[in-house]
Image (cartoon, rainbow, N blue to C red):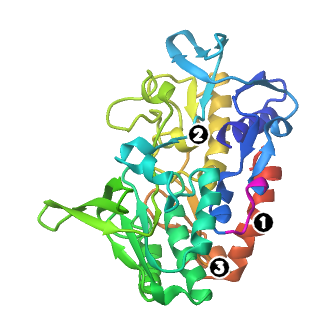
Amino acid sequence: MGGLTVAARLLRAVPDARVTVIEPRGEHHYQPGYTLVGAGIYSPEEVLWDQGELMRPGMRWIRDSVLAFEPDRNRVRLEGGDVVSYDVLVVALGVVNHVDAVEGLGEALDTPHAAHIYDLSLAEKYWRLASGFQKGSAVFTYPPGYVKCGGAPLKMAFLSEDLWRREGRRDGIEVHVHTSRPSLFPSVPRVDEAVTPLVEARGVRNHYESVLRAVSSSDRLAIFEEERGNGETREVRQHYDLLHAVPNARTPAPLREGPLTREGIGGQLDVDRETLQHARYPNIFGVGDCAATGAAKTAATIRKQAPVVVQNLVDVLSEREPSARYDGASGCPLLTRYGRCMMFEFDYEGELVNEWLYQPTRETRLWWEFKVHGLKPLYRHVMLNGYV
């Protein structure tokens, strides 16, 4: 989404620009819809588009993957052997699942007791498991480090609990949320204060500063490392009958192992968090999940970042200093139960913005309908066409 949105917007700003998009996949995945696949609202087919149909006139599409960045020579090498030179480069590689970061998780995901919604086929699997789940212990996890769509793990716990309650199965099901964070939504304190008592009243058992380290699929045990108040840790073994285990995320190898990152930022693109310009290479910019801004990794973030990247890119081409600034704005439609959603935007400081519009600490039907019916056409016809 990040690359196509910036490319489309750039062509609107500079119609005669030579814009090249390097993208290996023929299918475009509408990833904000993965939670709705896992909740049985969308079918998998409803989150797929033909990639070629999304390329705007004027874009040159190279269907290949980046093998290595060579910023000192202003070029990238591709897996197919070609070399592509550039005047300015926008890095929008996103992040990928790192299942092997948790011992045994890969094996567990091959069993009929575990899945997650950060992969389309596994999201479809999760819906099958959750919709047929009758009784036992349901365990949801939230990993350390950066997470793509940080609200998604909570959405799945909340929606699943509501599904089982609506269908009269809730009394036989324990719902456990293990999060590596000190609270459910620490990045936005006012939302955290609203959400936590709401879900605790529904009997959801929250376990804080609890990191999934291993899974033993043979006896269905999730093994956590839990922080204690004195700075020590202890091992906690949690039995599960249904496990929604969110994998750790990391950037693709050409970025995390290449010259565009640095120590201490988890392999992400080393950018100024306001201008989105690379710290060492002024003709390189980043957008979306792969950039080390500290902002949430969501589609809403890209919607706010793309205009800044394009303006500053044009400034650099015109031999001016970058003039646009990104304030960390992002947003989240937090699905709290079927038919209800909290919608909010927030900045780098975790302060809510545009409260008059969103009424962010209320569960409403309006924002549920927007998430289910309004966001996808906005993404497809507005954002990807450069109208953000």
Which mark is on residue 338?
A: 3
Viewer-nearest of labels 3 and 1?
Answer: 3
> Residue type at mark 1?
Gly
Asked if residue 201 lies left or right of residue 359, the reply is: left
Q: What is the CA distance from the residue labelled 2 to the residue labelled 3?
A: 32 Å
2 or 3: tag closer to the N-terminus:
2
Residue 101 location in percent, x, y? 37, 43
Residue 340 location in percent, x, y? 64, 80
Q: Mark 1 points at which residue?
A: 374
Residue 51 location in percent, x, y? 79, 38
Q: What is the CA distance from the residue labelled 3 to the residue labelled 1?
A: 16 Å
Q: In the image, what residue occupies the spot 63% across and 24% down?
A: 65
Q: In the image, what residue occupies the spot 36% across and 75% down?
A: 206
Viewer-nearest of labels 2 and 1?
Answer: 1
Regarding mark 2 in the picture, which secondary structure is present there?
loop
> Residue type at mark 2?
Val
Q: What stretch is highlighted in magenta?
A: 40-45
Instruction: Give yes or no for residue 43 being in the magenta stretch.
Output: yes
Q: Name the residue under label 2.
A: 287
Q: Can residue 238 be seen in this view?
A: yes
3 or 1: tag closer to the N-terminus:
3
